[in-house]
Image (tube, grey):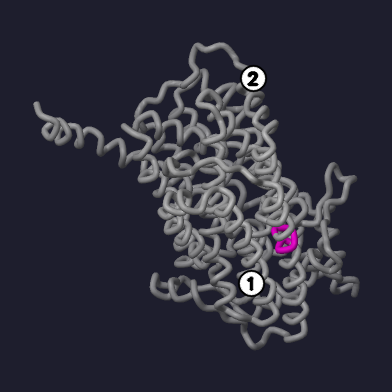
Amino acid sequence: MNDTAQAATAEPRKSPIVMLLSAMMFLQFFAWGAWFATLSAAMDTHLLGAFIGGAYEAAPIAAIFAPLFLGLIADRFFASEKVMGVLMLIGGVIMLMIPGVAESASAFAAESADTMRAAGTYEPAAFLEMQSTENTSGKTLVWMILGYLLCYMPTLGLGNTIAFTHIPSQDEFPKIRVWGTIGWIVAGLTLGILGWSASYNIFWLGAGSSLALGLLCFALPHTPPPLHGQPMDVRSLFMVDAFKLLANWNFFVFAVCSTLICIPLAYYYGMTATYLNQTGFAEPGATMTIGQMSEIFFMLLIPFFFRRLGVKIMILVGMACWVVRYMLFAYAATEQTTWMLLLAVALHGICYDFFFVTGFMYTDQKASKAIRGQAQGLLVFLTQGIGMFFGYRIMAGGSLFGKIPLALTFGDYGKQVTSAPQYVEALGAARGEAEASSFLETFTKMFSRDIPESVDAGILSETMGQWQDFWISPAIMAAAIFVLFAVAFWDRTKTSDATSPGEPEAAGE
């Protein structure tokens, strides 16, 4: 049989697997994007702003523990598709219970606000402080989100393992992985169509898609544990050999800057949906998909730019776009300029791809073949784990161990938007009940914003002024890291033979 005939007969056998793997990626990121992208808007709208930081920092905590779970259990004892299926089913059940807890937390918050107003003691900062200490349902909500993410985060590695095991070549991986980004986009558009961006219905959508993915996993091709029967390798589990790469000055600078840049990145993930909602975008979930759309476009251009610009220039371009994005957010607040807000969201494609995808490719070049997996795991640990954890905590003005304050500010820049609770109540009352929209109407709302004229001009001006100060802080951080990287990083690694970005990506979109 000639090669053409063999390909023709092999294609029907390969196609169902590719379709299953693509569906797995689609549901995996749909299940995450359905609630994570607009979680801050939903919590802020329901007076739970005091818990936004805690809810988002659950993601890096789960990312830190996920590699340990994979190395100790999933990679050694059980088939990958079954572990992933069980985790997603458990996560789906947890997600089903979250709306009830969230409603209870919101009821307590609303009652507290009414009581404080009646007593004449209502102050936004005091209200937020009171919620963080006395709203037990709010605290439970954060713990449940952490429980779900502890189930979800290991599936990012498991999904990649399953895909790489059953595709004929790594070159096929981007064609499958892109369905994850599409899933995130469709989730955002679905929220917009249904009018759920700032509603607790996001949890129902997340639960349904999680359970659907859990069931689909049992139809995936059998993927034996990759390390079955092998002795425990503590050096690999704790990335000992990968840490030795830090002895190289340029890789050390790259690792430090990658960790630090995730601090201002947390501001984007944690507060953009809230901010867009307060600046008049009725469905921020749909608006934020503009960033994922640009991500797909720039992902395709990464190999071209990587060969021509090199590692340092690409990473600096990514960092510079982060500075520009936050400055656009800052000055769009007081000026109420729609195009600045949309451009800031669209820059996500360059911000993410030019930094993270380029960073994974650089790491792949610096690490020997024997420790490439460790090196990629180390980068995820430093960025999505350590960097994002401190980023979310600093973003929310939190502390470490309840004793070390992490409210990083530059004068007034970086202070919390304390007038938000009062403004959100006024905005919600002026908007009334959200109505379901057609796809065309939702698509239009992605690009348009409207603040009802009945909203008090004084509270609007105060809130937008505070948002401007808030966003300038991550811009300053990103600019400082840009300068540090530009001065200290001088790696001359050749990039002419760079491969396409088909390696597992960092958590998040």
Q: Residue at x 63, y 52 (%)?
A: 100
**Picture coordinates of residue 506 (x, y %)?**
55, 43
> What amino acid is labelled 2 in the image?
Arg
Q: Secondary structure at mark 2?
A: helix
Find the distance from the CA under tag 1 to the CA under tag 2. Answer: 45 Å
x%, y% of residue 115?
84, 68
Side (left or right) of 302 relative to 19 = right
Q: Can you identify the residue that label 1 sits on?
A: 328
Give me the residue at 43% from left, 30% from top: 81
Q: Is residue 144 visible?
A: no
Q: Could you say where residue 444 lies in the image, as x and y percent from the top left?
A: 45, 76
* Secondary structure mostly seen in the magenta stretch: helix
In front here: 104 or 36?
A: 36
Specify whether 420 is left or right of 275: right
Quarter of the N terminus within the rendering:
top left
- Queried whether the magenta region covers residue 476, the answer comes back as yes
In the rendered structure, which amino acid carries the disc numbered 1? Leu
Give the mark, 1 or 2, whose residue is nearer the N terminus: 2
Please give the count of numbered marks on the rendered protein: 2
Relative to residue 388, is residue 426 depicted above or below? below
- Report the residue marked by disc 2: 235
Could you classify mark 1 by the number of other residues whose Cα lies within 10 Å: few (under 14), some (14-19), or many (20 or more)? many
| Identity of the residue drawn at 84% across and 73% down | 117
Res 221 label: none
**Which residue is outermost to the left?**
1
Q: Residue at x 73, y 71 (%)?
A: 467
Question: Is residue 489 at least partly visible in the picture?
Answer: yes
Q: The magenta stretch spans which residues?
A: 474-478
Q: Is residue 221 magenta?
A: no
| Local SS, label 1 | helix
Q: Is residue 139 left or right of residue 28?
A: right
Identify whether 398 is placed above or below 197.
above
